Image (cartoon, helix red, strand yellow):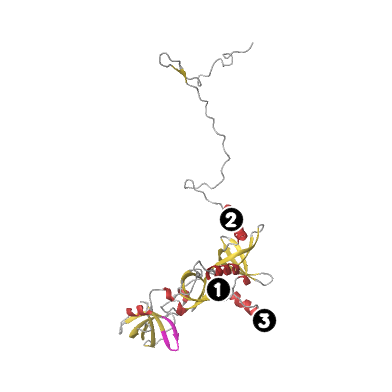
Amino acid sequence: MEPSADDALPEELPSSETQPVETSNAGEAPAERTAHPRARRAPPTQRSDYVLTIDARDRVQTEEEREEIIWHEIRNAYRTRRILTGILGGVEQTKSGRTLAIVDYKGFRVAIPILEMLLYTGEMPSNREYLELMGRLNRMLSTMLGAEIDFMVKGIDSNTRSIVASRKDAMLRKRQSFYMDTDALGEHLIYEGRVVQARVIAVAEKIIRVEAFGVECAIVARDLSWEWLGDARDHFSVGSRILIRIQSIDRSSLEGMTITADVRSVSSTTNLDNVKKCQPQCRYAGRVTDVRGGVVYIRLNNGVNAIAHACYDLRTPGKKDDVSFAVTRLDEEKGIAIGIITRIIKQNL
């Protein structure tokens, strides 16, 4: 005998799951509300190990995560031959006597052989001349410590995470793009008279060396500012960026490309503007920038360049001395004040 539909139903439902029966209007069948089963909680997920931050929905990278991201970036740059930029942080000698430039790229050590730094473009000499050249290149490299360096990765070792690179390849590529290639109108991206941003890669007392899109250039003190500079190191530092104006470009060859540039012409203020700040028969304070052939060169505190042929003080003025200067006349054609030193205010001993 087959079971009926009534036999298949449980004899009694739990009271928590029974729902009241609503009575309908007259003549209509009663409507029953079906009961929904209780929602079950999802099983607990695995505990998260990332850093819990104070700000909501923020996340802090661990040192391991950060290194993995940067290493992935370096590997991609190696495959795609993309130019990277780091800071020259050291100069090392290998056991075989070779010199390496050590560049820091986001915490990773990048080794660049000195011949891949493009500090010398001529033919390599031999014997004693080669040793003299290497010594000169080593001194040049030491003055560049702290400078921004472009490079292209030439080889990597994933096990030791060692990186070997070339600055030469990066600079030649930039030279091709900015100095040799032309746009739709046949114009070069960098041309004579254009103002560009450059990196300061070395600074001495009377000269600085800059790198502008793959080409290095030396700029002497007289082309750095309209005001006389006693020491370029007081105004420029390795690693900084400045504006320069390209004066000339030699595009005869990619490796032998040279430029000349200055910083002075970028400034809107000239000597002719400054000299108007002085009046004859008046005294001004200034600082000695140089002494040559009995002539004292002074930069007054108001920015005017001045020359003194005599000094009333019994002491002899020297570089960086603070002096009192009396103007006898103005040379408006050259934009300088001419006069005498009446007193040495403070000597730089």
Residue 119, relative to residue 46: is it above or below?
below
Percent position of residue 315, x then y: 41, 86
Q: Is residue 324 left or right of residue 31?
A: left
What's the CA distance linking mark 2 and mark 1? Answer: 30 Å
The residue closer to the viewer here, 189 or 22, is 189
Pick the quarter of the image with the N terminus. top right
Q: Tell me, yes or no, whether the highlighted magenta stretch contains residue 294.
A: yes
> Could you tell which of marks 3 and 2 lies nearer the N-terminus?
2
What's the CA distance linking mark 3 and mark 2? Answer: 44 Å
Q: Is residue 312 left or right of residue 139?
A: left
Look at mark 3 in the image and give the residue it sits on: 128
Percent position of residue 132, x then y: 63, 80
The residue at the point 59 percent across, 13 percent down is 4
| Element carrying mark 1 | helix
Stretch of the chain drawn in magenta: 288-296
Q: Quadrant of residue 104?
A: bottom right
> Could you tell which of marks 3 and 1 lies nearer the N-terminus?
3
Q: Amino acid at mark 1?
A: Thr
The residue closer to the viewer here, 217 or 203, is 217
Look at mark 1 in the image and give the residue it sits on: 143
